[in-house]
Image (spheres, rainbow, N blue to C red):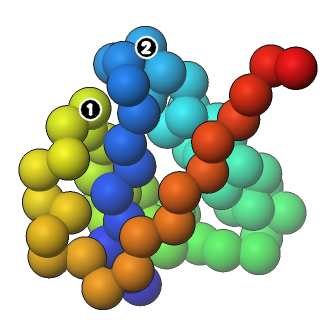
Amino acid sequence: GYNVILRDMTSKALSRGYTQISKGYQNYVKRKRITTAEYDNILSNLECQTTLANFGKCDMIIEAVFEDL
């Protein structure tokens, strides 16, 4: 799998994002689309941070900005 850095402005927002990702993959495990070992591997490759540290080693950066209109 890929190593992924999830960045947000606050720890609270990071926690929400991580929880959403985790729940999505838990559904895959329940539906037997992935194994528990694959689920654990996916989450172990996810690094959460509130700074821009470690982005220098990235091959690709995807920015998603959500706005309340």
Q: Nearer the viewer, residue 68 or 16?
A: 68
Q: Which residue occupies 14% across, 76% down?
A: 57
Up the image or down, 62 lies above or below 51; here it is below
From the viewer's perspective, is 42 left or right of 11? right
Q: Which residue occupies 41% across, 70% down?
A: 61
Amino acid on which disc 1 is placed: Thr
Residue 39 placement (x, y as % from top left): 51, 63
From the viewer's perspective, is 41 left or right of 49? right
Q: Residues within 10 Å of mark 2 (few under 14, many from 20)?
A: few
Q: Quadrant of residue 4?
A: bottom left
Mark 1, secondary structure of its residue: loop
The N terminus is located in which quarter?
bottom left
Residue 17 placement (x, y as % from top left): 55, 34
Q: Nearer the viewer, residue 35 or 53?
A: 53
Q: Residues within 10 Å of mark 1 (few under 14, many from 20)?
A: few
Q: Which residue occupies 20% across, 37% down?
A: 51
Up the image or down, 64 lies above or below 40; here it is above
Determine which residue is flagged by label 1.
Answer: 50
Up the image or down, 34 lies above or below 19; here it is below
Determine which residue is flagged by label 2.
Answer: 12
Farthest residue in the top direction? 12
Amino acid on which disc 2 is placed: Lys
Q: What numbered label is drawn on residue 3?
A: none
